[in-house]
């Protein structure tokens, strides 16, 4: 049998690694600070009948980055040029990192998106238009969007708290990563920028569930 040259051997290794990733690994995405707006707040900030401008699709079906930006403020300071993510929600909320919360001077809880009862309020500003919200700021809890097919393959249940090892340049095990199983999702893990910096995240970073 003819020996493999180094190029052929490298391609075989790449193929095996790719197959292992597909079977055992989940890709990680880092999510920066952003806001979700309800219809009423869109119209207050941008005008009656205004439609947010989609500029880029996100990995999750139906979710997108908008062209419009806002400033969000707390008792201590403000964060400028904050992206709006669509589509519109039933309630307005801001998802920030713990570092962001120090800049704003507030202490939001760590919550999954949409869970905003008993959370701090904030101010949203666009030009000369402002809205004061009495709740809505959270630190986004790390989570795994996962399809039912991948959940079955990886033996994951909806709302299960997972431990994941993220293989960034500074590998880290993140505990209490909440699985969110739905046919409307694509399989990705979402962490915030504080967590991304901690593990040395770069685009194309993968993680593995630790049992």
Image (tube, grey):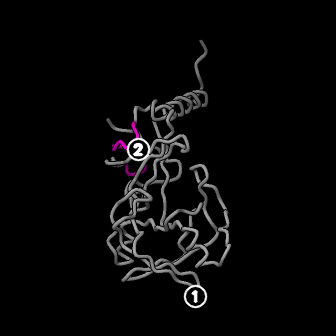
Q: Are marks 1 and 2 in contact (CB under 8 Å)?
A: no
Residue 179 numbered mark, or none: 2
Decide which of tag 1 and tag 2 comes sooner along the chain: 1
Place of residue 146 in the rendered image (x, y in percent of width and height, measured from the top left): 48, 41
Considering the image in quadrants, where does the C terminus appear?
top left
The quarter holding residue 88 reads bottom right
Q: Is residue 167 magenta?
A: yes
Judged from this view, the residue extending furthest toward the top is 1
Q: Examine the rendered structure and indicate whether residue 97 appears above or below residue 189.
A: below
Taking the spot 38% from the left edge, 51% from the top edge, the residue there is: 170
How would you rate the neighbour count of disc 1 (Cα within 10 Å): few for under 14, some for 14-19, many for 20 or more? few
Under circle 1, the secondary element is loop
How would you rate the neighbour count of disc 2 (Cα within 10 Å): few for under 14, some for 14-19, many for 20 or more? many
Place of residue 177 in the rendered image (x, y in percent of width and height, measured from the top left): 36, 48
Judged from this view, the residue extending furthest toward the bottom is 128
Say left or right for 104 vs 48.
left
Taking the spot 45% from the left edge, 54% from the top edge, the residue there is: 201
Taking the spot 39% from the left edge, 64% from the top edge, the residue there is: 116
Q: CA distance from mark 1 to mark 2?
A: 40 Å
The quarter holding residue 74 reads bottom left
- Name the magenta segment's main secondary structure: loop
* 178, 116: nearer the viewer: 116
Q: Which residue is mark 1?
A: 128
Residue 93 numbered mark, or none: none
Under circle 2, the secondary element is strand
User: Which portion, as a residue range, is magenta?
Assistant: 157-171
């Amino acid at each position: 049998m003819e020996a493999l040259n180094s190029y052929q051997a490298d391609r075989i290794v790449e193929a095996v690694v790719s197959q292992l990733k597909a079977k055992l690994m989940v890709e990680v995405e880092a999510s920066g600070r952003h806001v979700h707006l309800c219809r009423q707040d869109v119209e207050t900030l941008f005008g009656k009948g205004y439609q947010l401008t989609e500029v880029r699709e996100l990995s999750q079906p139906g979710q997108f980055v908008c062209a419009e930006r806002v400033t969000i403020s707390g008792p201590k300071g403000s964060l400028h040029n904050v992206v709006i993510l669509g589509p519109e929600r039933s309630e307005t909320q801001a998802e920030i990192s713990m570092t962001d919360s120090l800049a704003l001077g507030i202490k939001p809880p760590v919550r999954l998106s949409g869970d905003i009862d008993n959370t701090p309020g904030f101010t949203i500003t666009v030009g000369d238009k402002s809205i004061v919200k009495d709740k809505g700021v959270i630190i986004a809890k790390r989570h795994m969007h996962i399809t039912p097919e991948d959940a079955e393959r990886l033996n994951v249940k909806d709302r299960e708290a997972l431990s994941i090892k993220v293989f960034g340049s500074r590998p880290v095990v993140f505990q209490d990563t909440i699985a969110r199983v739905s046919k409307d999702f694509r399989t990705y893990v979402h962490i915030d920028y504080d967590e991304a910096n901690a593990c040395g995240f770069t685009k194309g970073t993968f993680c593995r569930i630790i049992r």
